[in-house]
Image: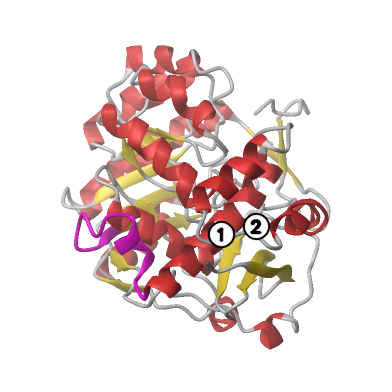
Amino acid sequence: MPKIVSARVIVTCPGRNFVTLKIECDDGTTGLGDATLNGRELSVASYLTDHVVPCLIGRDAHRIEDVWQYLYKGAYWRRGPVTMAAIAAVDTALWDIKGKLAGMPVYQLLGGAARDACMVYAHANGTTIEDTIGVAKAEQAKGYKAIRLQCGVPGLASTYGVAKHGARYEPADADLPSESVWSTEKYLRVVPELFKAAREAMGWDVHLLHDIHHRLTPIEAGRLGKALEPYNLFWIEDPTPAENQEAFKLIRHHTTTPIAVGEVFNSIWDAKDLIQNQLIDYIRATVVHAGGITHLRRIASLADLYQIRTGCHGATDLSPVAMAAALHFGLSVPNFGVQEHMPHTDETDAVFPHAYSFDEGMMHPGEAPGLGVDIDEDLAATYEYKRAYLPVARLEDGTLCNW
């Protein structure tokens, strides 16, 4: 019985902030879990250090389900992004340990591979339609079979989801929240033109995706989905805020364009009604934000009953630890759909050496025991935490947007 003897939180910023939990057992086996919550990283770090870690010492590292239930039900205050990110870090680290002790990659412990590799999608964005398509064709040349397209909105100084001045895209962009101006009317005019041009330039043998970032009302989302039907999108993502899940019925009534949602979900209860009422086609909850591998498997199993597939969030606000966990999960579940992929910086990859690999639009977690990811703690210590916030947006009349 491997007993947990220590657990500690490592905060590092190799280009952006990451929070990592490292658990050690009495036999020296260690496991890693990602606890990064973009824009609120230190909240999770404190939750782990001050409240969770003391409860782990002396526990059997093999009892993953029992530890998960203890941390979820025992806190009384259930759910929420901070709590579930902390639980996810513990859960993922324990799966890492179990894999290492078994001498097997985690996906083998989850039932083995259900496919040869996981299809991933790239990001292509630019200030203009032409710029975006140029980037998309470059990603297509790298072998990507699925590409998300975002472009600047004419008449707006900046657009969420579009990198500035050709830099790498990072949504948490300032040490205090930056503000931008938004116009739904201008946005709705440009998006159909983007995908019309994309199909003309790229053909029909590539999956095209688009992220709305919760910025439309249900009827506006239905209108956009209808306008995009001729271009056969793989999905439109986060068309409207999901707190009011009845809203998705209205979208369904107006378009057959597939809908993806859930990167901000943190439990099965957030997704239950959307799944059971078949109001979505892809569930985007993540290992790190939805309670770890253990809980994400429950969400995927529920979705599988309704022919809904996974499409897990995978932006660079998830560390390589989370990416590895997502690939082990994705390789094993029967209803995998696609995995988001934004390559990390060279600095991040150096801090988190990993076994997963990319080839021709597909990724594989590798055959290393456990998750196949390590952390260079000395190198991590050289990158100090930097406060960073996600931006907020206002309408052109100054009203703070309610999404």
Q: Secondary structure at mark 2?
A: loop
Q: Is residue 351 above or below residue 42?
A: below
Q: Tell whether label 1 touches label 2 (CB within 8 Å).
A: yes
What count of labels does the image hold?
A: 2
Q: Which residue is mark 1?
A: 318
Q: Residue furthest front?
A: 1
- Report the magenta residues as a range: 103-119
Q: CA distance from mark 2 to mark 1?
A: 6 Å
Please, what is the three-letter code of the amino acid marked with disc 1? Leu
Q: Is residue 279 visible?
A: no
* 270 displayed left or right of 383: left
Q: Is residue 29 visible?
A: yes
Residue drawn at (67%, 53%) of the image: 38
- Residue 57 lies, in percent from the top left, at 71, 62
Quarter that holds the C terminus: top right
- Depth order, front residue of 263/10: 10
- Residue 125 lies, in percent from the top left, at 46, 55
Q: Which residue is mark 2?
A: 36
- Depth order, front residue of 355/252: 355
Q: Earlier in the sequence, mark 2 or mark 1?
A: 2
Q: Is residue 358 above or below residue 134?
A: below
The secondary structure that most of the magenta stretch takes on is loop
* 363 displayed left or right of 94: left
Residue drawn at (36%, 26%) of the image: 225
- Residue 136 lies, in percent from the top left, at 34, 59
* 398 displayed left or right of 254: right
Residue 156, by quadrant, is: top right
Describe the colour scheme in one phrase. secondary structure
